Image (cartoon, helix red, strand yellow):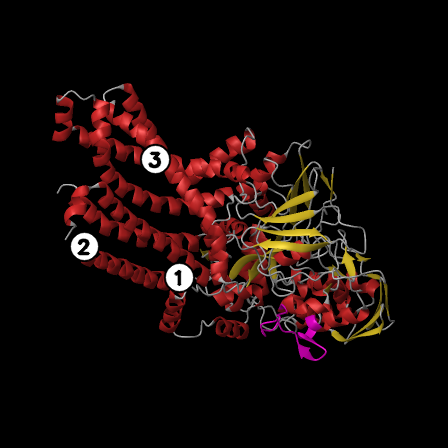
Amino acid sequence: MGNRTPHTRLGLGRRVAAVAAALALTTLAACTGQTTPGTSAPGASASPTEAPAAKTLTIAAHPELITLDPTAQAPAASAQAQLFNVYETLLKINSDGVPQPLLAQRWEVSPDGRTYTFYLNPTAKFASGKQVTAEAVVKNIDRIRTGQVDGKPVTAPDGTPVPVGAKYSTWMKVVQSATAVDPTTLKVTLTRPSNTWLYAMGDTPGLIADPDGFATLASKSAGSGPYQVKEWRKGDSLVLERNPGYWGTPGRFDTVTFKYIADPNAMNSALLAGTIDIIANEQAPDSLAQFADPARFTIVEGSTNAEVTMSMNNASPALKDVRVRRAIALAIDKKKVLDDVQAGRGTIIGSMTVPTDPYYEDLSGVNAYNPEQAKALLKEAGATDLTLRFRPANLPYATAAATDITAMLKAVGINVVLEPQPWPNWVQQVFVGKDYDLTIVAHVEARDLNTYDNSQFPNYYWGYANPAFNQLWLAADQAPREQYPDLMKKAARQLADDAASVWLYMMPNLVVTKATVTGVSQNQTTDSFDVTTIATR
Amino acid sequence: MIRSIAGRLGVFALSLLGASVVIFLACQALPGDPATALLGTSATPETIAAKRAELGLDRPLPVRYVEWVAGMLRGDFGRSFATGDSVTALIAPTLPVTGSLAALSLLLAIVIALPLGMVSALRRRHWQGGAVSVLAQLGMAVPAFWAGILLSIFFGVRLRVLPPNMYVPFAQDPVEWARHLVLPVVSLALVQAAVLIRYVRSAFLEVLHEDYFRTARAVGWTQGRALLRHGVRNAALSLVTVLGLQLAAILVGAVVVEKVFILPGLGSLLLTYADRKDVMVLQAVVMLLVLAVLVINALVEVAYVLIDPRLRAGGRA
């Protein structure tokens, strides 16, 4: 008797416990959505292995790719692993931000800046063995531009369309036509001259895939690079193997593995124990002291294209007045934010541009920290009782910076209601719905200051509308190449003067490798973590 | 007997059905719209509407629920929103990982807790009993993930005797498979063992005061023999209940431990896809965990019958 009653009671209890456990899991899962990065995936760098029998290289990265097709979707994780390693471009933007020949041996620009002629390397071929012809390149440009090849939509074997990310097709809108003059000569005509277009051709939008593989890009790699995709273990890793027929200098490794690890501590432990060779993007800058021994590890610190930006909704009544926006900028001590959030690593910036941009200028002095002046400006603008809704994306760097900034704004008399938003909510309410006053997120795309041009991006969440800026940007983009940097500087300065946003700092490129690894690119100027330059002792 | 079995099955099915409703609704109530999460910064009101239609999110909730349940009955868990992969194909490779982790952890917990719990009960007035109790208290205070991080740093990074994290499939290299599982299994098992020790102790303490035990001692049996002959089986009855509960706790703990040790199991899958608000995958994984717990419960009930002959004869009302 005494034995029976207790477990009958427990039987019900256990059923309740089962459901409770399930709910707890769901909640737990919902609460851990903290790992999604900025406006797209962060980039990374690279590195090698020691020299055992089979040459392997294991790179820890985060987040994981969602599709094998690097052109399908905005998050750059697929391009991080594959651009330059599996897929190549006509030209390659090097670590200093300068275009170099790759599939094209050289190129010419017509005097009016509208026609580019590319001379392809006749030895270049895809992993399938077929030559990279001008005709193949035309098909790639057409696909990115319109989603169509030879007037027909590209579809997967199951009949669904093969998607092209809007972020990539936007860059190709300026192309009027692309034609193959002969198998190795390609002519591209633009609707207007564009300096930024050439850079886009050296990044993900310009990657050249084997047209025969268009239909299956999401499941099978079809590049011309030194590696090809061997296996994608979903939720775990992407394994690349050497392309045996590579047309250029062969890859140095038999296999290259991108191992996806969400937890920064686990990533660090794996490198400390030697089970991985490289951390492509160190997510915990304050933990770098563990890798201080140069006999065992190398820390590579450089630049990225990511501007960590405190956006101000220029369209909201409170922030329409440029004096209020300037006052907010003046109230923020960016140095303290950088120290607190990134352990001081990164570069303080003053506009939507980073040091590897050809038009970079240090504008951190514009509206630099001056709380007294901020108070005076607020008084002048009559904004003495200002309350702002601060909705940063719920990402570690953004919430940490927001906490600092909230205190700084309160110090100059601005009331702040801080409401960090989980990533999907942030996209929905802040980015799409524009329901915010202040927010923080990293903008990782290269040369993306044209997002402030409301003729190109009419509904962008900045709410910024200044025809003068639009003209400056267009004039710079269309200008002869040698005038491009100086003219684009004017556009960047206009943004800074208008305090269109507060650009806090450039996210540092932090790569940690075993000491035996060399050749890791210091600066991340494209979406790629480029393995081709990496070697191991 | 047959009616009793049919009744149990009915309760089992009802529990599953109830759980499926709760899970479905909870996943729908998660903050953020999956279509928006997928589109990220390429989201516009138009692209969101198109994506929602593509994913079938524009249809009424009851329709989607019925489709989901009907699919599961056919063994089809649907497709991931983000990647279009079959959810079954995503889950299948994680089962051996989480399965071996949970089973080995429970086994190790029992191997540790049974002798220590008995010692603690028998030697409760001596220093050994006290020591075990103190250790058990300590063990219970340490969360599994924390134990995992410490073990990983100490044995994996400092001493470098075991891999600090990651996984090697059994089929690829059984030795490496075992080496990679040692630390995660130990970190899960230690905490569970600490809990279990206390139950073992009290179960055996109870036995020590039973009439049949005193009788056995009175006819001259040693304490150890009396315990083995009469004690273990009686104590087992309440311990099996606890073990069923603990296996559920281990499954939940595995989610966190898998993250610490980067094991590609069910827990890692759950967290990765929660991040992407991939509701189809989440629903399936949580449903599977609930199913596992319910099956364990059923097995526990079977175990009662095997252990206790009194239940076999008459059955229960």
Tell me the residue at 25%/37% (across/down): B236
Structural distance between the alpha carbons of marks 1 and 2: 39 Å
Tell me the residue at 36%/60% (across/down): B23
Res B1 label: 2
Under mark 3, the amino acid is Ile
Q: Is residue A495 left or right of residue B216?
A: right
Q: Is residue B223 left or right of residue A344?
A: left
Residue for badge 1: B27
Q: Is residue A287 visible?
A: yes
Residue B144 image point, x, y percent:
41, 39
**Residue A161 falls inside the magenta stretch:** yes
- Which is more N-terminal, label 1 or label 3? 1
- Under circle 3, the secondary element is helix
Snapshot quadrant of residue B21: bottom left
Residue A119 image point, x, y percent:
86, 65
Tell me the residue at 56%/33% (across/down): B157
**Highlighted magenta segment, given as a residue range:** A143-165
In the picture shown, does residue A417 fall above or below A175?
Answer: above
* Mark 2 surroundings: few (<14), some (14-19) or many (≥20) residues within 10 A: few
In this rendering, which labeled residue sits more in front, label 2 or label 3?
A: 2
Tell me the residue at 85%/61% (across/down): A121
Q: Mark 3 and 1 residues: CB-CB less than 8 Å, in contact? A: no
Res A469 label: none
Structural distance between the alpha carbons of marks 2 and 3: 32 Å
**Residue A443 falls inside the magenta stretch:** no
